[in-house]
Image (cartoon, rainbow, N blue to C red):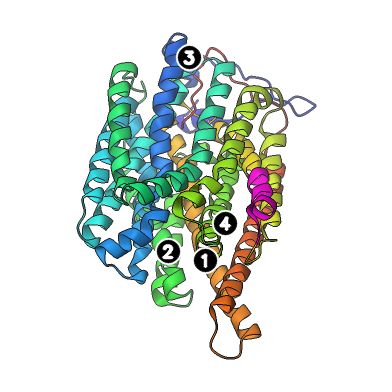
Amino acid sequence: MSSTEQGRHLARPDAATADGARTPRPRTPGDGAHVAAPAAPGKAQWVVLAVLSLAQLMVVLDATIVNIALPTAQQALGFSDENRQWVVTSYALAFGSLLLLGGRLSDLVGRKPMFLVGLVGFGLASALGGAAQGFGLLIVARALQGAFGAMLAPAALSLLTTTFTDPAARTKAFGIFGGVSGAGGGIGLLLGGVLTEHLSWRWCLYINVVLAVVAVIAGALLLKHEKSPDRPVLDWAGTVLAILGLVGAVYGLAGAESNGWAAPSTWGFLTAGVVLLAVFCWWQSRAEHPLLPLRVVLDRDRGGALIGIAVVGAGMFGIFLFLTYYMTSTLGYSPVQTGLGFLPMIAAISVAAGVVGSVLMPRFGPKPLTPTGLLLAALGMVWLTGIDVDSAYASAILPGLLVTGLGLGFVFASAMATATLGIQASDAGVGSAMANTSQQIGGSIGTALLSAFAGSAASNWLSENVTGAPTAADAAHAAVASYHTAFWWSAGFFAVGAVVTVLLLRRGAPSIDPDAAPVIAH
């Protein structure tokens, strides 16, 4: 069997029975399956899960924790409204564009070293940002956070895979891990509000130093240093194409809100990014040692799960971004009140993810769970389109948050596990990075699209309803109209994702040969 044929053989999903359920495909030692080291005994496994979840929480919450702190930071450092977006975008740009490289490096160097290097670098970059006395240094620190986060996230998820080899324990662990990933954004909003209001906006960055110290000590003591026996060669051409393509796409999308879609800087970077990513895909089909082996993304289940993760990333910004604006600007909530307002959704995500990961996923598989979660999220967003300038939290916001939270918990627990199911051990890091990249790029696209649609809706409302200079009341109604538009589009994203995942995902609970490593990534 040639190396190409062997790669296809390994990528082939488990055989399907007549009723659509899958049965494990036997694997032999020469099949490319990597036999993992024995899992950490008993309670030690769950301590490792706590360490990895802490690291994942640090990466996820940092994407939102600074949102509530931005007005205070802007006042302290004196940067303009036009530059404000780069505090968020610089992190997303570095994180999203370097994830594939970070994932492959974890396969090359080893997961534990990359995990610890990522933690230390993330903590130091956070300290630098917290101490920044100017806008430029803050942006550099945020970009460094994203770069080290791109090393940390794939390594953490790969370590989770190799730690939990028992199928039942693994699904439960992924449910918990998925819940942390889903709730991290909301926790970031809550924590950002508390720290900003009672300490300083700088503590939204300093808090990462505390978390990193705890995670580094625990990780150094508990994690095992293991290298894949089939260490891949780094694909430098693919690495450059992937980084430049993702940077171009994310940069172009980030500039769309301030510069407009017709601006050369917007469509120029977008076009260049898309072309480079297309060349990257072509090169991956020809490279001897591709950065992203196409077998990682072409499996139906894995592809459906990655789409589900990307859709959640895009739609979630309709919740975190615009609902934060609504509660603070329209309803006049304080930062702490706004953060507390998201607590019910965080609780719903955690409960749903735990039930799905430990009970439903092993029994039913991802097909009924991921689409159901996306539909629930869509219904929650539709409910939120009923908000007004003086709506009550309990009747207008809370039900939508609870339903959306349940849906997100379903998706995170089922899609996170499925997105990396059956990946070869040598591809574990890059497979994990692909799941993170899907969520990050989905979020970047969602931010750009929803911001543009919301801005147009506000302008249209004012032009249709106001003849003179708009009053404060007019501005509030226009803002609510823009939120309605963002929520409707978010609901549409979720609904389309539900349809796509129904068509792609196979029926039945996924199975893994117990003699082979559960080579998953995350």
Pick the residue in front: 464 or 477: 477
Magenta: main secondary structure? helix
- Give the distance between the C-alpha atoms of the residues marked 4 and 2, in whole angstroms: 16 Å
Q: Is residue 241 visible?
A: yes
Circle 3: is it few (<14), some (14-19), or many (20+) Cα within 10 Å? Answer: few
The span picked out in magenta is 391-404
- The three-letter code of the residue at mark 1 reads Ser
- Give the distance between the C-alpha atoms of the residues marked 4 and 1, in whole angstroms: 9 Å
Q: Is residue 390 above or below residue 42?
A: below
Q: Which residue is mark 2?
A: 254
Circle 2: is it few (<14), some (14-19), or many (20+) Cα within 10 Å? Answer: many
4 vs 2, front mark:
4
- Give the distance between the C-alpha atoms of the residues marked 2 and 3, in whole angstroms: 47 Å
- The three-letter code of the residue at mark 4 reads Gly
Q: Which residue is mark 3?
A: 29
Secondary element type, mark 2: helix
Residue 177 bears which disc, if any? none
- The three-letter code of the residue at mark 2 reads Ala
Q: Earlier in the sequence, mark 3 or mark 4?
A: 3
Q: Earlier in the sequence, mark 2 or mark 1?
A: 2
Secondary element type, mark 4: helix
Q: Which residue is mark 1?
A: 451
